[in-house]
């Protein structure tokens, strides 16, 4: 029995791609727009522009002011949100299926007809500066930004999504208008609808509102180049935030699925080897996780934890021991657990319209095709212990990245990085 939903895709004459997934019995629909532009696509002086743009599209168009934009969605019981990532920008709505036309009206308005009022720019600039201040006070965020900057040193991919306060202060209305003209084109845009949606009717509604967009050119990108290294950001905090990681293949590489399963196996639950060794057996930290982050041309497997400075050195020793041991031997129970956890996560995403909408959008942006759930599940179930051990060994052959935000305690944690490099 197939687990695949009823997914259909259409490409409009101007190159805009549309994907729908019918979920029988659902009265709601998640309708989203995904732009193939993120922080990795920005010049250094304008790092943070995509995030600023994402904030500003809700602040006024040729037809609606800021309040009217959200009221149009909320008056029919819907919700609207947006986010910026390294490689894309998303605007997402959820509402009753009979109001799909309202969602598409608003999405087309904010993405193609925003006017970026000067007073709203200055108001939102202050908001983003506050957001940056909050992030600067969060050791986890500081450690993650430092990790990215080392993993992809001297590349746009290593810069923070929100940019710097200096850049946020210099972004102008002309920058925002130029960003809209360049990136809000049909070749860089995907529209998805998931839930109680009829594909042909949805395509007609999208074409009515987005069919006029110029085709534009697909956004060229410089291929990611992993570097790695060590950095300690000293701060007087109770807990030290740790991010340790290695490069893995990107999402367009067939091997990526093996590394996703490896991340799940190492630290994806309370019975995982990392959680057991760090918390249950030694009480070194409240939480430790392992997870993967994948772009089209590269990815990372990361281990993150918060730890008392006095436990830092032992935590790093134990973590490295667990990861290195996976290159030699993996318990059958852990393989079974991680496979089933991945299958469960896959099943849950198929029951959540917003999650499935994002899945469809990112697949079209990255692969230019939908990788159906059945194909993904088959990939996961085909991964055995030998493949996981080989993936671990390959990962560990690369230089790791380690960042610490907080106090380091006794000793020099950089020696552990050297140990990891030596295997």
Image (cartoon, rainbow, N blue to C red):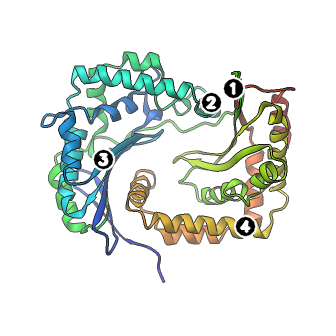
Of circles 4 and 1, the one toward us is 1
Residue where numbered disc 2 is placed:
139
**N-term mark: 1 or 3:** 3
Callout 3 secondary element? strand
Residue 53 placement (x, y as % from top left)? 33, 31
Q: CA distance from mark 3 to mark 4?
A: 39 Å
- How packed is label 2: few (under 14 Cα within 10 Å), some, or many (20 or more)? many
Q: CA distance from mark 2 to mark 4?
A: 33 Å
Residue 214 visible from this viewpoint: no
Q: Is residue 175 left or right of residue 338?
A: left
Of circles 3 and 4, the one toward us is 3
Residue where numbered disc 3 is placed:
80
Callout 1 secondary element? loop
Of circles 1 and 3, the one toward us is 1
Q: Which is more toward the observer, 132 or 217?
A: 132
Name the image quarter holding the C terminus.
top right
- How packed is label 4: few (under 14 Cα within 10 Å), some, or many (20 or more)? many
Residue 298 placement (x, y as % from top left)? 58, 45
- Contact between marks 1 and 2 (CB within 8 A): the answer is yes
* Residue that appears at 65% across and 68% down: 339
- Disc number for residue 335: 4
Q: CA distance from mark 3 to mark 2?
A: 29 Å
Q: Which is more toward the observer, 198 or 12?
A: 198
- Disc number for residue 237: 1
């Amino acid at each position: 029995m197939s687990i695949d939903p009823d997914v259909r895709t259409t490409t409009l004459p101007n190159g805009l791609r549309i994907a729908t997934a019918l979920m029988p019995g659902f009265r709601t629909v998640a309708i989203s727009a995904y732009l193939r532009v993120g922080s990795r696509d920005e010049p250094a002086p304008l790092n943070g522009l995509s995030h600023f743009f994402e904030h500003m599209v809700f602040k006024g168009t040729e037809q609606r002011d800021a309040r009217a934009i959200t009221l149009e969605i909320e008056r029919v019981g819907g919700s609207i949100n947006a986010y910026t990532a390294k490689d894309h920008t998303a605007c997402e709505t959820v509402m009753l299926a009979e109001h799909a036309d309202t969602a598409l009206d608003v999405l087309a308005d904010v993405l193609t007809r925003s006017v970026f009022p000067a007073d709203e720019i200055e108001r939102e600039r202050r908001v983003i500066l506050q957001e940056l201040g909050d992030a600067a006070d969060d050791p986890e965020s500081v450690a993650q930004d430092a990790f990215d900057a080392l993993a992809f040193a001297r590349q746009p991919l290593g810069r923070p999504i929100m940019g710097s306060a200096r850049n946020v202060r210099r972004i102008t209305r002309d920058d925002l208008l130029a960003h809209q003209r360049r990136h809000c084109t049909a070749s860089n845009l995907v529209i998805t609808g998931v839930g109680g949606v009829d594909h042909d009717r949805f395509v007609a509604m999208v074409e009515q509102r987005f069919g006029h967009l110029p085709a534009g050119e697909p956004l060229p990108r410089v291929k990611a180049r992993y570097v790695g290294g060590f950095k300690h950001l000293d701060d007087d905090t109770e807990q030290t935030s740790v991010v340790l990681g290695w490069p893995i293949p990107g999402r367009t590489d067939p091997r990526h699925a093996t590394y996703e399963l490896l991340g799940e196996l190492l630290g994806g639950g309370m019975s995982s080897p990392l959680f057991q060794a760090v918390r249950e057996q030694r009480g070194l930290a409240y939480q430790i996780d392992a997870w993967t982050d994948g772009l089209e041309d590269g990815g990372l497997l990361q281990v993150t934890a918060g730890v008392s400075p006095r436990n830092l050195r032992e935590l790093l020793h134990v973590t490295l021991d667990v990861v290195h041991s996976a290159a030699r031997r993996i318990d059958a129970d852990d393989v079974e657990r991680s496979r089933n956890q991945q299958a469960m996560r896959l099943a849950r995403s198929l029951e959540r319209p917003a999650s499935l909408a994002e899945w469809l959008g990112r697949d079209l942006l990255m692969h230019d095709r939908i990788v159906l759930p059945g194909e993904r599940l088959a990939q996961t179930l085909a991964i055995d212990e030998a493949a996981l051990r080989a993936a671990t060994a390959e990962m560990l052959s690369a230089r790791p990245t380690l960042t610490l935000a907080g106090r380091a305690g006794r000793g020099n944690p950089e020696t552990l990085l050297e140990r990891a490099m030596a295997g």
